[in-house]
Image (cartoon, rainbow, N blue to C red):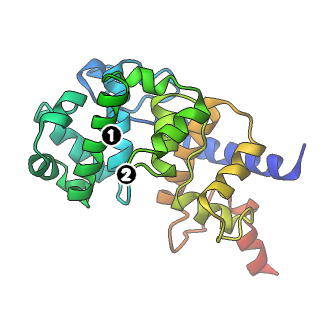
Amino acid sequence: MDATREGLLRIYDALFKAYGFQGWWPVTSKDCEGKFPQGGYHPGDYEVPESPGDKFEVCVGAILTQSTSWKNVEKAVSKLQGAGVLSLKGLIQTPKSELSNLIKSSLYHNVKAEKLKCFADFVSSDYDGDIEALLSLPQGKLRLTLLSIWGVGPETADSIILYAAKKPSFVVDTYTKRIFSRLGFLNGDESYDEVKKLFEENLPQKKPLHNEFHALIVEHAKQYCKKKPLCEDCPVYELCEEKNSKSN
């Protein structure tokens, strides 16, 4: 087995052993009420989201989570649900100022309100309001289509592809770069697409693996691999190149 592939899979195995199934992307619509009581998380169930409404919720969440924490996004999604506007029609018909106020907790709320409206308008005009039709596009075409929408960048597009369309597209975020630079897989100055290529060329193209790996990276960054790392008891400490370089 190639050394890079083997190394990535060892990291995955260590993280999975430490944290287990993550249940991403959480969905909290009425369709799932009572089914996933832990905040919409669904550990080990990769068929979620199933309904068009839940898939649309994931798309909205992917846009809202830009440059903020999921905790802030949860509050915004809850506000949208409470106001009855977490839908294609709801986003289109709600005035931008009102929408911005509802998602205030997600930060950069004025810009994100515009992004949500652009996304909803695109699905409405180009796909006749059918989110399933958009998400069913072949993966390459879907990514290019999403990237053509104002406000949708590579990370958001890949999140939508992986978690809403349920296709194996690897999501790269700041945590990925931080952790894998410390582990020795990256220099730290790679582009988004270069990091994405590293993972996608060295991992099996399986949706559950991509799903869990990204979620495990996020959890590990929150628990141990922070800006100032907490190396004691870190589940991948023995595999860390930064640790090895300091000990030499």
For residue 40, above or below residue 132: below
* Category of crowding for the residue at label 2, using alpha-carbon neighbours closer than 10 angstroms: few (below 14), some (14–19), many (at least 20): some
Residue at the location (70% across, 33% down)?
205
Residue at the location (37% across, 37% down)?
59
Coordinates of residue 146 in the picture (x, y in percent): 46, 40
For the C terminus, which image quadrant? bottom right
Q: Classify residue 227 as left or right of residue 181.
A: left
Residue lying farthest to the front in this orientation:
125
Coordinates of residue 234 in the picture (x, y in percent): 61, 60
For the N terminus, which image quadrant? top right
* Category of crowding for the residue at label 1, using alpha-carbon neighbours closer than 10 angstroms: few (below 14), some (14–19), many (at least 20): many
Q: Classify residue 45 as left or right of residue 79.
A: right
Image quarter for residue 139? top right
Residue at the location (50% across, 22% down)?
136
Residue 38 visible? The answer is no
Residue tagged by mark 2? 151
Coordinates of residue 76 in the picture (x, y in percent): 22, 46
In front: 86, or 234? 86
Coordinates of residue 101 in the picture (x, y in percent): 12, 52
Question: Nearer the N terminus, badge 1 or badge 2?
Answer: 1
For residue 77, above or below residue 34: below
Q: Tell me the kind of residue under disc 1.
A: Phe
Q: Disc 2 on helix, strand or loop?
A: loop
Q: Are marks 1 and 2 in contact (CB under 8 Å)?
A: yes
In front: 142, or 197? 142
Residue 192 visible? The answer is yes
Identify the mark at residue 119; answer none if there is no mark: 1
For residue 6, above or below residue 32: below
